[in-house]
């Protein structure tokens, strides 16, 4: 009981002393030991590193998981020390819906077939995204978090200790100054009272008393200064470790860049595979269609075929001028029509459309002003609109 | 008075029609009345349309989630759309991360290795953010909007016509029931005439509905094209991002995995030859007269351990006495020590020696 009481009183005294010192500093009534410039610089650098590391960490988390509800859920699991159930990514869910839609709408229809292929690609994209999130978390987010929760906490603790040591040091300095002032005041008294023998004895005693007080204060100051210097050194060493922290974070940043590159490389490859499977290049088709000149609607393959046999005989007899004229007449229809292979069955929705069977060949051409999703198709004497997406253009 | 009379008549007629339909519907449910079955083809078309609507909706919703995973942002966009106001273009997540990285790099010092790398990464993240925004806009325009138009336009029309068809069928069946119950010849004639009228209306409505439903084929063709556009947009996005990442890796000028494998290779090779040299060195050390050969042995030892030249990329202040301070653009000799952290090498400049971080160096020869 006695021991605890003593310790409690001692701690209360220390706390009170620090509070007094702090207050007097704020009012400008006490001197404050300034840290050297290099040290201040290290402190600022550490603060800067901590702030920006935290911002980058948070925003990378948002980048990897944009849904705040999911982030809260993961945070709770982490705090409960339970393993987070691997969630289905948005891409994987979309893939599932597309696959199910294809099953219901008919796997053999063109829309159904394409949905299945796209679903497969989306699933792979979703898996790549999950891998990216996992790798980025381990190699980038975890080290940053470890710094904030480990090294930085240690630095903060040591800084607080340093602050306390400095307050103790300055309190001792203040106490020493007061003791010296009192001693100086005590030594002036004997001169005034020297003529009286009784007072001389008293003044000598007072002087000795204050002298002891000064010695004690000086000793306390030396102890406080030693502790302060040691704490400053410890803190400085920790702060200088920030350089190593930067090196470590730089390496983590490289890892993050590498995993992100891997992610996009995988996605790019999946999309290339998908485009090959879909077997069409819309950009190429649009480019090819543009230069073609539309033929007259009355032109037919039969007419073109009928014209062809006449050309050789006429060319051999007629002058060059007439031969050139004949070629010009033939050119327009040839440049507009082309062969196309049908990829999927298609049932005409109305009389203006042409029904199609998979794998057959038809002749197609475009008309000005017509919907770009459609072409005019001909099979024998039948003619009608056909959807572009059902065709594979040849020649 | 005439106006009032007319309105009352119309109201009574409507009420009668409604009641008649309700009675017919109820009797069908209780199995007391016959129901005209739609032909198989029409039933099939109806089922197909229903199926198309359901799955189109699911795919559309999930694509929206894929493009914008944050539900708060989606709600905000929805509200703006309903208010017919243009949504303010928000900074997306990669762009914000890019901004933070650039600001952090600027504050850490663009001349430092970490600061420099952060700024480059930040710029790349911003470009990825731009590509991401373009993907969202293109996909919304070419894929989501057509799907939404189908659900809110074509399908609503189909649903309306289906409802009318249902009503016409109830009228037809009610007329049939009434005809069956008719006793008097006069009532019978009236019922027969009514039946012909309702049959005619039903047939016309069935035809209209069938034509609309057959349009689903065109819808599928259109959606197929939209799906291809979506694939193309995604293709463009990933190609761009992949290119950005390749550019970034070139700028960072570092290939950690390559170096690590190289490091492992060089550290394994000299192990067998180290022992003979050590023995030779200790043997010669005992003979003070052979001082001349010591430098050559030391040189051999260095070569065995794999020392090489490296150029310093950035300034580095040593954090403690075991490290070597570096100045940008100077050339030093470096070698690896067995058991040391793979992020560090031993560096030498003249008679100074200390640890140096790999990421600050560009290895030569």
Image (tube, coloured by chain):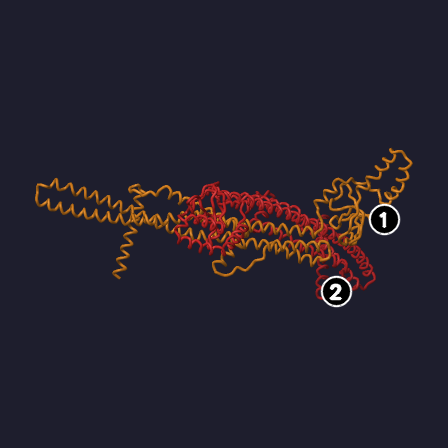
Colour chosen for chain A = orange
Q: Residue B135: percent from the left, percent from the top?
A: 62, 46
Q: Residue furthest front?
A: B289
Which numbered mark, 2 or 1, is in the foreground of this view?
Answer: 1
Is residue B223 shown left or right of residue A365? left
Chain B colour is red
**Mark 2 neighbour density, 10 Å: few (under 14) some (14–19) many (20 or more):** some
Quick check: A317 above or below A206? Answer: above
- Indicate the chain on which mark 1 is placed: A
Residue at 62 percent of width and 48 percent of height: B238
Q: Quadrant of residue A292?
A: top right
Which chain letter goes with mark 2? Answer: B
| B248 or A3: nearer the viewer | B248
Label 1 neighbour load within 10 Å: few <14, some 14-19, many 20+ = few
Label 1, secondary structure: give it: loop
Q: Do the residues marked 2 and 1 share a common chain?
A: no
Q: Is residue B73 found left or right of A306 in the rendered image?
A: left
- Which of the numbered marks, if any, corresponds to residue A381? 1
- Considering every residue shown, the one lying at the far bottom of the view is B31
In this view of the protein, which residue sits in the foreground, A98 or B329? B329
Q: Which mark is residue B33?
A: 2
Residue A353: percent from left, percent from top: 79, 49
- Asked if marks 2 and 1 touch (Cβ < 8 Å), the reply is no
Q: Can you tell which quarter of the image residue B178 is in?
A: bottom right
Label 2: which secondary element: loop
């Amino acid at each position: 009981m006695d021991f605890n009481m003593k310790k409690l009183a001692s701690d209360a005294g220390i706390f009170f002393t620090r509070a007094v010192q702090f207050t007097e500093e704020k009012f400008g009534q006490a001197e404050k030991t300034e840290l050297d410039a290099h040290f201040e610089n290290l402190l600022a650098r550490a603060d800067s590193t901590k702030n920006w590391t935290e911002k980058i960490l948070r925003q990378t988390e948002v980048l990897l998981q944009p849904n705040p509800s999911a982030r809260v859920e993961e945070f709770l699991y982490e705090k409960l020390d339970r393993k987070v159930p691997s969630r289905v990514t948005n891409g994987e869910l979309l893939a599932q819906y597309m696959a199910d839609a294809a099953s219901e709408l008919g796997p053999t229809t063109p829309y159904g077939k394409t949905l299945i292929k796209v679903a497969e690609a989306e699933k792979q994209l979703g898996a790549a995204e999950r891998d990216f999130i996992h790798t980025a978390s381990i190699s980038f987010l975890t080290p940053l978090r470890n710094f904030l929760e480990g090294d930085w906490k240690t630095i903060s603790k040591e800084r607080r200790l340093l602050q306390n040591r400095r307050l103790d040091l300055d309190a001792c300095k203040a106490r020493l100054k007061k003791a010296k002032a009192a001693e100086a005041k005590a030594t002036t008294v004997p001169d005034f009272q020297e003529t009286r023998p009784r007072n001389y004895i008293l003044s000598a005693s007072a002087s000795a008393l204050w002298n002891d007080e000064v010695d004690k204060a000086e000793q306390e100051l030396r102890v406080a200064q030693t502790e302060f210097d040691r704490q400053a050194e410890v803190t400085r060493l920790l702060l200088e470790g920030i350089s190593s922290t930067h090196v470590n974070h730089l390496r983590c940043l490289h890892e993050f860049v590498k995993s992100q590159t891997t992610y996009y490389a995988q996605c790019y490859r999946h999309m290339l595979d998908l485009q090959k499977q879909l077997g069409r290049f819309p950009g190429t088709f649009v480019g090819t269609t543009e230069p073609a000149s539309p033929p007259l609607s009355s032109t037919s393959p039969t007419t073109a075929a009928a014209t062809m046999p006449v050309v050789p005989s006429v060319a051999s007899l007629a002058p060059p001028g007439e031969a050139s004229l004949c070629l010009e007449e033939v050119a327009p229809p040839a440049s507009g029509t082309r062969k196309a292979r049908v990829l999927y069955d298609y049932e005409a929705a109305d009389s203006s459309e042409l029904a199609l069977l998979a794998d057959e060949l038809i002749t197609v051409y475009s008309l000005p002003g017509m919907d770009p999703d459609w072409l005019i198709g001909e099979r024998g004497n039948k003619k009608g609109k056909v959807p572009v997406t059902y065709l594979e253009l040849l020649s | 008075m005439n106006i009032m009379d007319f309105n009352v008549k119309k109201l009574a007629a409507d009420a009668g029609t409604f009641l008649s339909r309700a009675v017919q519907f109820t009797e069908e449910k209780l199995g007391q009345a016959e129901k005209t079955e739609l032909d198989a083809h029409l039933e099939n078309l109806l089922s197909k349309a229903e199926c198309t609507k359901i799955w189109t909706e699911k795919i559309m919703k999930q694509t929206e989630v894929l493009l914008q995973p944050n539900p708060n942002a989606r709600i905000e966009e929805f509200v703006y759309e309903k208010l017919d106001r243009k949504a303010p273009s928000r900074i997306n997540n990669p762009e914000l991360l890019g901004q933070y990285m650039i600001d952090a790099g600027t504050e850490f010092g663009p001349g430092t290795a970490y600061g420099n790398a952060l700024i480059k990464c930040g710029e790349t993240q911003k470009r990825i953010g731009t590509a991401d925004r373009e993907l969202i806009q293109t996909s919304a325009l070419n894929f989501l909007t057509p799907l939404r138009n189908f659900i809110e336009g074509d399908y609503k029309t189909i649903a309306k016509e289906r409802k009318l068809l249902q009503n016409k069928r109830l009228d037809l069946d009610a007329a049939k029931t009434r005809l069956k119950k008719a006793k008097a010849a006069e009532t019978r004639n009236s019922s027969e005439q009514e039946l012909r009228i309702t049959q005619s209306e039903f047939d016309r409505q069935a035809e209209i509905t069938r034509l609309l439903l057959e349009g689903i084929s065109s819808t599928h063709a259109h959606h197929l094209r939209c799906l291809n556009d979506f694939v193309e947009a995604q293709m463009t996005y990933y190609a761009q991002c992949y290119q950005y990442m390749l550019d970034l890796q070139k700028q960072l000028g570092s290939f950690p995995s390559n170096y690590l494998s190289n490091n492992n290779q060089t550290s394994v090779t000299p192990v067998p030859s180290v022992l003979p040299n050590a023995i030779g060195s200790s043997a010669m050390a005992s003979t003070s007269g052979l001082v001349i050969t010591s430098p050559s042995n030391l040189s051999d030892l260095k070569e065995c351990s794999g020392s090489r030249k490296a150029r310093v990329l950035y300034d580095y202040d040593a954090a403690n006495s075991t490290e070597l301070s570096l100045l940008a653009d100077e050339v030093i000799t470096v070698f690896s020590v067995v058991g040391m952290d793979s992020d560090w090498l031993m560096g030498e400049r003249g008679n100074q020696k200390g640890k140096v971080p790999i990421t600050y160096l560009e290895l030569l020869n």
